[in-house]
Image (spheres, rainbow, N blue to C red):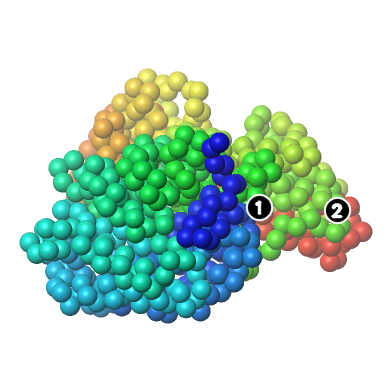
């Protein structure tokens, strides 16, 4: 009989309550280079939600490695690991301490010292040249892993996971893309790995888990680690391991590790199957790679692809993932947008999720437990902020009605062409609302008189009335048709003639619209003042891939340009550096500019509470977060001061 996701698994004599793993990932929750109480709350929440194994954020095993400002340092993490264990172990969750070194793919910005590498080969991203490690540095690295393992044992962790993934120094020694040494560490690329495994096992002993995160395909056809080479590595190392996590990626394919929705979910399935076959049962194997759908995870176990499934982003999106799977409920979906869970960013954002803004903020965010005093709520508008507000209000015991002026729910998310993945979130919100008894009135408009009457009855109003298009910042003449990105629908047939996408934002919308039009056979160009299309996509890891897709789709990119005017002759562009002008054919202009707040209902209510786009049109994260926050605040306000008022009003359009 095949294993189930909710079945326990025993590793090195230690029992995990389920076969779902939360993998290591940067969080920016640290204080200095230590794990903080926010880390503890973050991991405990996933353990409480059913995670069988939690691997903590990778800690550097040597002071030479400081890859980002708040990167943990293993020797500073004993107290933090101990607290994580104390918080997670009562839930039946194994805690593995992540240990690693990023080598030449790290950063010298914080350490102010030279990077280490197997050979003198510059990193393809930073272009920084490392020093070639000599015997002293190699010995120091091995001892660093030994010391990191000893620190983890002192914290009473259940084991450690060593990082030989896409950014890891251990992987750099395994790959001839980065290791061209002529000594024994080059002719035998596994030598360093064996030395590290031996040192770590000596510290762990036989009763703690030794896991390895191994890149099994660097996705380079001319050199590097291929699946065949990785199968040999896995066979050679399996006997020393208690768990093997199969991942993909390397210096030339950094987006292959945790890509966004453009790569299919569970994309490592066949790679994992191949590696599991190669180790022939010598070590349990973990499937990693955009596994966010419980059905894909179940299939991986049922088909013998893996023994454990890593569902990291799925558990950021819903910490109760495993508990919900166990009771047959539908988890809040991960939409693989990478917008807020990827935090290797100079701004040092804290890890969170567009659909679950509580992620990363567990120590400060209030719970959604049902309120003692129930009321009646009206949500005007069915966008993401309104749906989340309605869900939270209903969850806390309120009778909720949602009045939406259009014929469908979802707001701007529903209108976003080229981004159907986002609709999974608003669909989930709608279904949750329906399950909680929320009533929906579509095609309904709430008037000023209704709001006045509600306020006279002591109603608490929360306005989240959405956004509207802004006037174009240049004159438009001739017979050019002008549309906003929100005016497009997936079922539409675009008009004939050349289409121009005006994208002053540089986010995912402009690129998605251009791709959507090109896929429907239109002549498409995109205009941006930036020097690269989709400039903001670097934060999601999609910048290079997006421009590759635009190139392959035949989309013309007018860079460093602004639109001066549009008339019967076409669209006049001016280069912002040279002031040279050119004319581009244009029959249809699609405006992807920032929108303006739609605050008609709130304009006569200066004291009204607002949420989402009516405050300022921003991203899905802010809409969901503010819908939730204001619903919680409204119910707390009811309990503390207005228990006698039966009606709470929340509006969104």
Horizontal and vertical percent position of residue 639: 84, 62
Horizontal and vertical percent position of residue 640: 84, 66
- Quarter of the figure with the C terminus: top right
> Mark 2 sits on what residue?
374
Within 10 Å of the Cα at label 1, are there few (<14), some (14-19), or many (20+) other Cα atoms? many
583 left or right of 157 in image: left
Residue 625 seen in this snapshot: no
Who is closer to the viewer here, 270 or 588?
270
Name above or below for residue 94 compared with residue 36.
Answer: above
> Mark 1 sits on what residue?
627
Name above or below for residue 216 compared with residue 160.
Answer: above
- In what element is the residue under mark 1? helix
Identify the image quadrant of residue 501.
Answer: top left
Who is closer to the viewer here, 48 or 388?
48
Identify the image quadrant of residue 165.
Answer: bottom left
Q: Name the residue at 66% across, 52% down.
A: 627
């Amino acid at each position: 009989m095949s294993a189930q996701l909710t079945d326990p698994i025993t590793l090195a004599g230690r029992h995990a309550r389920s076969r779902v793993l939360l993998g290591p990932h940067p969080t920016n929750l640290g204080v200095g280079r230590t794990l903080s109480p926010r880390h503890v709350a973050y991991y405990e929440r996933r353990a409480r939600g059913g995670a069988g194994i939690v691997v903590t954020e990778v800690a550097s095993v040597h002071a030479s490695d400081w890859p980002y400002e708040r990167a943990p340092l293993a020797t500073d993490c004993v107290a933090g690991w101990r607290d994580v264990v104390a918080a997670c172990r009562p839930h039946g969750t194994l805690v593995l301490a992540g240990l690693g070194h990023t080598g030449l793919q790290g950063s010298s910005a914080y350490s102010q010292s030279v990077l280490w590498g197997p050979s003198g080969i510059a990193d393809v991203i930073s272009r920084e040249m490392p020093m070639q490690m000599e015997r002293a540095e190699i010995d120091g690295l091995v001892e660093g892993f030994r010391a990191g393992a000893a620190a983890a044992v002192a914290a009473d962790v259940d084991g450690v996971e060593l990082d030989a993934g896409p950014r890891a120094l251990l992987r750099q020694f395994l790959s001839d893309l980065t290791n061209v040494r002529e000594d024994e560490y080059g002719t035998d690329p596994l030598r360093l790995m064996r030395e590290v495994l031996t040192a770590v096992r000596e510290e762990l002993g036989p009763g703690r888990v030794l896991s390895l995160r191994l890149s099994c395909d660097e996705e380079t056809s001319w050199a590097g680690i291929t699946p065949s080479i990785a199968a040999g590595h896995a066979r050679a190392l399996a006997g020393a391991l208690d768990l093997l996590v199969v991942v993909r990626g390397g210096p030339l394919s950094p987006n292959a590790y945790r890509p966004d929705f453009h790569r299919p979910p569970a994309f490592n399935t066949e790679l994992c199957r191949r590696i599991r076959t190669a180790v022939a049962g010598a070590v349990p194997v973990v499937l990693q790679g955009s596994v966010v759908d419980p059905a894909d995870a179940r299939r991986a176990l049922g088909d013998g692809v893996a023994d454990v499934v890593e569902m990291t982003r799925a558990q950021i999106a819903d910490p109760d993932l495993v508990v919900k799977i166990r009771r047959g409920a539908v988890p809040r979906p991960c939409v693989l947008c990478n917008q807020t869970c990827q935090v290797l960013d100079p701004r040092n954002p804290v890890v969170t999720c567009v659909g679950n803004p509580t992620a990363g903020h567990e120590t400060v965010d209030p719970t959604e437990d049902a309120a003692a005093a129930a009321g009646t709520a009206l949500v005007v508008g069915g966008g993401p902020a309104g749906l989340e507000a309605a869900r939270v209000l209903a969850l806390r015991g309120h009778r909720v009605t949602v009045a939406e002026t259009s014929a469908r729910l979802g707001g701007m998310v529903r209108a976003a062409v080229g981004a159907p993945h986002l609709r999974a979130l608003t669909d989930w919100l709608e279904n949750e609302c329906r399950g909680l008894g929320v009533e929906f009135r579509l095609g309904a408009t709430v008037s000023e008189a209704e709001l006045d009457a509600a306020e006279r009855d002591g109603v608490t109003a929360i306005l989240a009335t959405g956004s509207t298009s802004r006037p174009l910042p240049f004159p438009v003449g001739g017979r050019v048709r002008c549309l906003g990105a929100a005016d497009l629908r997936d079922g539409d047939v675009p008009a004939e003639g050349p289409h121009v996408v005006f994208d002053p934002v540089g986010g995912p919308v402009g690129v998605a619209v251009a791709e959507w039009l090109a896929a429907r056979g239109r002549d498409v160009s995109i205009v941006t003042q930036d020097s690269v299309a989709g400039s903001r996509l670097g934060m999601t890891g999609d910048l290079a891939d997006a421009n590759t897709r635009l190139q392959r789709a035949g989309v013309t990119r007018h860079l460093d340009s602004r639109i001066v005017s549009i008339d019967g002759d076409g669209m006049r562009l001016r280069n912002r550096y040279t002031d040279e002008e050119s004319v581009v054919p244009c029959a249809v202009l699609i405006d992807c500019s920032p929108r303006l707040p739609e605050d008609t209902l709130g304009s006569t209510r200066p004291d009204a509470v607002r949420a989402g786009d009516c405050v300022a049109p921003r991203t899905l994260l802010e809409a969901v977060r503010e819908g939730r926050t204001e619903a919680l605040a409204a119910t707390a306000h009811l309990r503390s001061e207005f228990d006698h008022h039966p009606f709470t009003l929340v509006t969104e359009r």
